[in-house]
Image: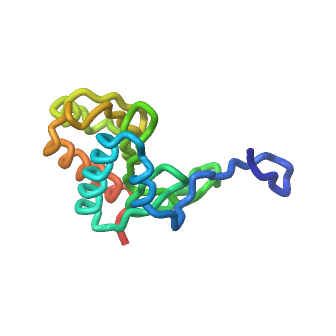
Amino acid sequence: MGLKSTSGERKATVKTLENDASVARYIASIGDLRRQAECKLVLRMMREISGEPPRMWGTSIVGFGRYHYKYASGREGDWMRIGFSSRKKTLTLYSMGGFKKMKPILKRLGPTKHSVSCLYIDSLDDLDTEVLRELLQLFWDEMAAYYPLD
């Protein structure tokens, strides 16, 4: 779904927006206690690395920081710098800077899968959490390089 512009063309609308929903309530709503504990660990790490308070984006993404983007097409908006979500099968970490420069650290991290900006983790038990902390720092630093912090 989208909005029609005055020229009649369809414009996409962003559905996942930053909001005032409770991060603690979201995490408490996760039925799998192991996944709930993993989210609490990632929450703590991202908060320490970013120095930002966690905010809900949509109904199921916890994000830290914010940046404003504008595409050549004219589409623009705000998005989190880093974040995570508990999905049905994985804990998903969001790195808006992507993973091109992160292959060496991903090898040290342990078994994961990734797409352009999402890292999919089956279980933190399978990963080196110190390497995870390094990776989260790289996520944050990469975004600061693209979109300098105020």
The image quadrant where one finds the N terminus is top right
Q: 124 or 78: nearer the eye?
A: 124
* Placement of 5 over or under 20, stated as above or below: above
Measured from the top left, where is residue 95 in percent x and y?
Answer: 37, 46
Residue at image location 39% in from the left, 60% down from the top? 24
Residue at image location 39% in from the left, 45% down from the top? 94
- Count the numbered circles shown: 0
Q: 25 or 129: nearer the eye?
A: 25
Residue at image location 81% in from the left, 47% down from the top? 9
Q: 14 or 55: nearer the eye?
A: 55
Q: Is residue 75 left or right of residue 27?
A: right
Residue at the extreme bottom: 150
* Placement of 87 over or under 59, stated as above or below: above
Q: Is residue 7 left or right of residue 90?
A: right
Quarter residue 130 falls in = top left
* Placement of 82 over or under 19, stated as above or below: above
The image quadrant where one finds the C terminus is bottom left
Measured from the top left, where is residue 59 in percent x and y?
Answer: 54, 52
* Placement of 97 over or under 81, stated as above or below: above
Measured from the top left, where is residue 128 in percent x and y?
Answer: 15, 37
Residue at image location 37% in from the left, 53% down from the top? 82
